[in-house]
Image (cartoon, rainbow, N blue to C red):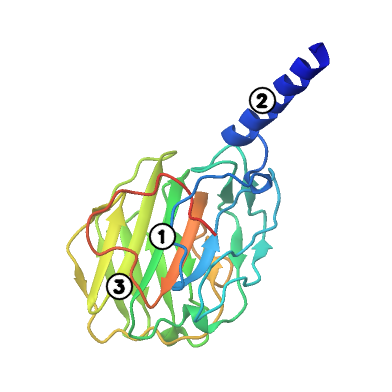
């Protein structure tokens, strides 16, 4: 009887440990999640890995631009179990050439269509930072990037084909998690922070993001331009659909795969 009670006690501890994220979430089959990783999703990075790991996985469910793209860690970019929005880890960038790159892929060629980019962001240094970039510089006129700007404006999306930048004011606090989104729907470009639209809807009539190159997360695609000092979590990109065009409640759980 005593052995049976001890076994039940151990099983209870194990169950609670998985539920609290003490053990890696990918070992648990009961991890709570929300919908949103759908047929339009072309990139989905959860983090959820052991501390210091430099292995990154794309779990996008997209059908037109199939997920599972190879992700390469550059510099010291790594999973960090000390800072995350959803257990058990976030992605850490130290501001000295850390970034995640992908192969050249048509998924990043949004053209004149709708798209959405979203993630949780925690800045540790207040400096100009390219968050996600399709800017290879060859030729420069064919690329785009999403940026936090310390000077001038807060969030900006730059379209090189038209040499056009759309920016809105935002003044973040350091060491604080924010949910960030930029979405295009038709001729409108929308910026959101924590589910609230920031600035007016931007007119992007004529924008054609028609480049087919690689993607860089955490700095310019050349690996050195305006590197990010901080953390990202739950990175999602959609092609063919916006994430949001009106106020919303930020995700309280990670996306399902």
Quick one: SS at disc 1? strand
Question: Quick one: SS at disc 2?
Answer: helix
Report, in whole angstroms, how far the alpha carbon at label 3 lies from the one at label 2: 47 Å
Q: Quadrant of the N terminus?
A: top right
Viewer-proximal residue among 163 and 36 = 36
Q: Position of residue 251 (x, y in %)?
A: 39, 49
Residue at which label 3 appears: 184
Disc number for residue 118: 1
164 lies left or right of 201: right
> On residue 12, which mark appears?
2
For marks 3 and 2, give the one nearer the viewer: 2
Residue pushed farthest right? 3
> How dense is the environment of label 1, judged by Cα within 10 Å: few (below 14), some, or many (20 and up)?
many
Residue 67 in the image: state x and y as whole percent: 57, 72
Q: How many marks?
A: 3
Instruction: Return the residue found at the far front.
Output: 1
For the residues bearing labels 3 and 2, Cβ distance under 8 angstroms: no
Quarter occupied by residue 151? bottom left
Identify the residue shown where x is 71% and y is 27%: 11
Task: Work out whether residue 35 or residue 222 is closer to the camera in this orientation and state it.
Answer: 35
């Amino acid at each position: 009887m005593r052995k049976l009670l001890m076994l039940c006690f151990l099983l209870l501890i194990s169950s609670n440990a998985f539920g609290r994220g003490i053990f890696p979430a990918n070992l648990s089959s009961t991890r709570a999640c929300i919908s949103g990783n759908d047929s339009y999703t072309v990139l989905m990075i959860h983090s959820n890995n052991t501390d210091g790991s430099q292995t990154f996985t794309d779990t996008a469910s997209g059908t037109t631009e199939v997920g599972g793209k190879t992700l390469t860690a550059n510099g010291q970019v790594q999973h960090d179990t000390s800072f995350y929005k959803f257990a058990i880890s976030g992605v850490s960038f130290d501001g000295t050439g850390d970034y995640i790159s992908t192969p050249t892929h048509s998924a990043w060629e949004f053209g004149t269509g709708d798209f959405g980019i979203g993630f949780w962001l925690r800045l540790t240094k207040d400096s100009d930072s390219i968050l996600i970039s399709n800017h290879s510089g060859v030729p420069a006129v064919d690329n785009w990037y999403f940026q936090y700007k310390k000077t001038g404006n807060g969030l900006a999306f730059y379209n090189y084909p038209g040499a056009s930048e759309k920016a809105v004011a935002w003044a973040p606090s350091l060491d604080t998690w924010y949910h960030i989104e930029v979405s295009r729907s038709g001729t409108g470009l929308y910026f959101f922070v924590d589910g609230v639209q920031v600035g007016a809807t931007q007119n992007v009539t004529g924008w054609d993001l028609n480049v087919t190159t690689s993607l860089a997360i955490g700095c310019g695609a050349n690996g050195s331009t305006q590197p990010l000092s901080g953390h990202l979590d739950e990175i999602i990109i959609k092609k063919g659909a916006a994430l949001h065009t009106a106020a919303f409640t930020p995700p309280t759980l990670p996306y399902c795969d």
